Amino acid sequence: MKVLKFGGTSVGSVESMSSVKQIVESCHEPVIVVVSALGGITDRLIETARMAVVGGDGYESHFRAIVERHKAMVQQAVEPAKQLELLALIDPLLGELGNIFRGVSLIKDLSTKTLDTIVSYGERLSSLIVSRVIEGAVHYDARFFIKTSRQYGKHIVDFDETNKLVKRYFAELPRVAVVPGFIASDRITGDVTNLGRGGSDYTASILATALGASQLEIWTDVDGFMTADPRVINTAYVIEHLSFTEAMELCNFGAKVIYPPTIYPVFHKNIPILIKNTFNPSAPGTLISADHSHFEGKAIKGISSINDTCLITLSGMGMVGVIGINSRIFNTLARSGVSVFLVSQASSENNTTFAVRNADADVAVRVLREEFKGEMAVGEISSIEAEKELATVAIVGENMKHTPGIAGKLFNVLGRNGINVIACAQGASETNISFVIARDSLRKALNVIHDSFFLSESQVLNLFVAGVGTVGRDLLKQICKQQQRLLETKALQLRLVGIANSRKCLFDREGIDIEHGIELLDREGTPSSPQRLKDEIIAMNIFNSVFVDCTASPDIAALYRSLLDHNVSVVASNKIAASGSYDLYRELKQTARKRDVKYLFETNVGAGLPIINTINNLINSGDKILKIEAVVSGTLNYIFNVVSAEVPLSRAVRMAQEAGYSEPDPRIDLCGQDVIRKLVILAREAGYRVEQSDVEKHLFIPESYFTGSLDDFWRAIPDYDATFEAYRRQVAERGRVLRFVATLDHGKVEVGLREVDSAHPFYHLEGSNNVISITTERYREYPMVIKGYGAGAEVTAAGVFADIIGIANIR
Ligand code: ADP
Ligand code: ASP
Ligand code: MG
């Protein structure tokens, strides 16, 4: 025989009732069907009781809704021929229930005993209905054979009595027996009691064990036991097989799918549990059994959590080495009915920390202060304090046993995401590591663990993109195009969780459609400001976050420090921060290192060319940069390439602007500022401490042209054409070309115009290309040269994209 338990949602609607009917009727052996109250009814009963106890008739409409729900179910789910007989059983029960509510409202008293009585009607009613839905089913009343006794104010199953009675009641098994779950009765008084919220699972387990069932099936509303709570982790998936130990560890820590006490009885008798979905019966479900398959490679099977956690800490030097302190702590708590679910004590023994539910915290502190009054008076124990608003997370898996590095990896990913572990515990059985964190970090912690232990099929990077001008727009296009491939080949999922320009911003932790991101921003965005961006990103507190700055704004660059400090990586095409004050540059790098996140800005120099990465690789492998010579202004190079006898300087500048190479204000390029910024970044990455003011400038347009407004500049610059053309002609006659070169030479930095002849590597440099030549101790005689497109939205966006992928650390 088998025991099948159907939860509240499984018996909550007419459609699900008909599924239940089909599932049970297709069994080819005797079955005991245990049912919960119709979905949501237990909560409704409790709510109605709470309304009644206030007095008056405010509760009546709630009660009427409960009556209607059951009557409607009878009318719609039960064959007409059986309805009258069923109503004859149900109506008196509903009548009794109405009287009890009336009594509560008149006396304005709701004792535990009365509430236990009230909630019992949920299962009493549902089981009667189910017994008339399934063909040939016989109804049993669990109060006759599930017996409890009181311990520490709780109802505990009396197994001796219960097993005896169950065997007697089911000495002869009908083909289908229907039993209300959850409810029981006190073995001495006979009063109705229950097994605790979610207790129908337990009823089913008790019956399966007492009768030696071949299997216990828990039919619910999900496809099986999942790697994490599917309401929090949307990538959670069904685990095919769990050992009893794994299931027990996960349930004890909040995986609601099975009520925790359910597992022990069947484990003890080695009866497997199968979790199935009433709404999708063909899904294979999850099998929980004794055999633990070592073949499933993953070290951890699942994660669960309790967000109701309070840590209590006893500290004091006088506790060190004293025998019996822990025994007194736990005895005192036990006497007050406080359950402790995590204990942690450092070997120095000068404090002991344990976790209890928030509701138990005040009692726990009070009784402990009382118990240790003497020790506190003489200072042997200095404090007994509670810290509330915490959450406990457990990672579980039998494969963790003897696998080094799991705890290391766990705490590492938490740290990298800015989650502070307040206490932790791992039993020597090594199947569970539990730790306590702030409650508001719970969602992030669960996501990051789920992601990093590859419980998820893919790794996620959550992107906030600021700036959707030419570079930002191209970046989104490239991500959109590449997204599917990255997912398929690298298991990397790029999720856009925020997008902003200077006017609007839009956030969505579930992900914004990248293809239509900019339209969505226009349509649905709300007013944007740098402060708002920072506040939202920090408040969203999402794991594996990357802030991508495709703006040129100093105000956005000013956010990096706080973002890095909150464990958000930064990828910037904006060069303001890296070329700003040296102290700021260093601070950003150090913050990133301290927080174990990345600050990447490869596109600050040479757009998509791998320049900064190359310099880093050289230095990290022990080389020393002696000299760098570079043409890093695409705009200036373009200008020198087009300027000729026919195209005067002023026209060439205009063409560079129109082609989108130059900054919107071309003076920033012409006065060398853009090159100076890039040189400063190169020098710093090469290991030199330099500021922009250290750079010596040799400009080719007199400073006076840069002083007025942009319009003044456009008006005045043609005046300089003739002078420049005369110079250019001389250079050309010497067989040379002009290049604007940035130089770092043993720490000395300089930018200026240089004539190069055809033997020089910078001579052939077409269009807006960049070239950089790096002389190092290893590359001394023949410097390393990197050359190619150095400007343009597409290559810059590609460089930003490469930095983003660099954060995921995939190859
Ligand atoms: P029932 O009424 O059938 O007893 P419950 O609501 O008690 O159902 O339990 C099923 C629910 O448990 C699921 O709908 C799901 O939201 C939640 N749940 C939490 N953690 C897990 C998990 N690890 N695996 C599956 N479900 C989980
Ligand atoms: N109906 C009870 C509850 O909601 C028992 C159960 O469904 O398992 O807690
Ligand atoms: Mg349940």
Image (cartoon, rainbow, N blue to C red):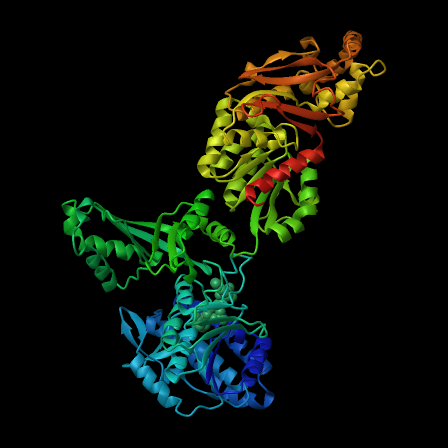
- The residue that appears at 22% across and 55% down in the rendered structure is 368
Q: In screen coordinates, is 253 left or right of 655?
A: left
Q: In screen coordinates, is 293 left or right of 728?
A: left
Q: Is residue 421 visible?
A: yes
Image position, residue 681 (x, y; %): 57, 24
Task: Place residue 749 in its image quadrant.
Answer: top right
Q: Is residue 94 visible?
A: no
**In front of the other: 40 or 536:** 536
Give the residue at the far right of this rendering. 646
**In front of the other: 112 or 303:** 303
Give the residue at the far front of this rendering. 781
Quadrant assignment for the C terminus: top right
Q: In screen coordinates, is 208 left or right of 148?
A: right
- The residue that appears at 47% across and 36% down in the rendered structure is 565
Q: Is residue 71 above or below residue 240?
A: below
Ligand 2 positioned in quadrant? bottom left
The tally of labels here is 0
Image position, residue 767 (x, y; %): 76, 25
Q: Is residue 170 above or below residue 353?
A: below
**In front of the other: 788 or 509:** 788
Q: Is residue 417 above or below residue 721?
A: below
- The residue that appears at 18% across and 53% down in the rendered structure is 372
Image position, residue 525 (x, y; %): 64, 42
Image position, residue 467 (x, y; %): 64, 35
